[in-house]
Amino acid sequence: MTRRLHQSAPARDDELDDIPEPANLRFLRRMVTLLTVTMIVGIAVVAGALVMRIAGESGGTPMTEIRVGPGYSVKSVDHGAGDRLVLTLREKASGEDIVRIYRTEGTAETYTVVDD
C-alpha cells in the first residue's frame, strides 16, 4: 500500500466557487473600491491645484503704465498702503473728481501715467 504525503482536494475548490457572495460582503467590496477611486481623484485634484498655484505666481508682470482715457485729466497720483496706487482724475466735461485705486504687483515705485 502506497501513501501520498500531499493530497490535493480539487473538489473542495469547486464547492467554494458555487457559494454565493453575501450581500454585506458585496456592498463592502464596492464601498472600498469607491473610496479608493475617490481618494485617487482627490489626490490628483490637490496635486493639480498645487501645480497651478505655483505656476501662476511667477506669471504676473509688474504694472508700469496706466492709460487715462481722453475725457479725463490726471489731478494727483499717490502710493496707497502696501501695493496700492491711488489715482485722482478730473472728468473734463463735468469737472468731477474720480478716485481710482489700482493694485500693483509688489510695491508701486516705477510707473508712468499716460494722458490720451
Image: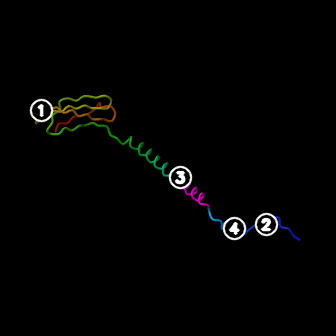
Q: Is residue 73 left or right of residue 38?
A: left
Give the label on residue 15, or none: 4
Residues packed near mark 2 inside 10 Å, few (<14), some (14 to 19) or many (20 plus): few
Tell me which numbered mark, 4 or 3, is placed earlier along the sequence: 4
Q: CA distance from mark 4 to mark 3?
A: 32 Å
| Magenta-tinted stretch | 22-35
Viewer-nearest residue: 96 or 51: 96
As drawn, 9 above or below 91: below
Tell me which numbered mark, 1 or 4, is placed earlier along the sequence: 4
At horizontal 25% and vertical 37% (from top left) the residue drawn is 65
As drawn, 104 above or below 10: above
Q: Nearer the viewer, mark 1 or mark 4?
A: 4
Q: Nearer the viewer, mark 4 or mark 3?
A: 4
Q: Amino acid at mark 4?
A: Glu
What colour scheme does the image use?
rainbow
Disc 1 designates what residue? 95
Give the label on residue 7, or none: 2
Proximity of marks 2 and 3: CB atoms separated by less than 8 Å = no
Tell me which numbered mark, 4 or 2, is placed earlier along the sequence: 2
Q: Quadrant of residue 64?
A: top left
At horizontal 56% and vertical 57% (from top left) the residue drawn is 27
Q: CA distance from mark 3 to mark 1?
A: 65 Å
Proximity of marks 4 and 3: CB atoms separated by less than 8 Å = no
Tell me which numbered mark, 3 or 1, is placed earlier along the sequence: 3
Proximity of marks 3 and 1: CB atoms separated by less than 8 Å = no
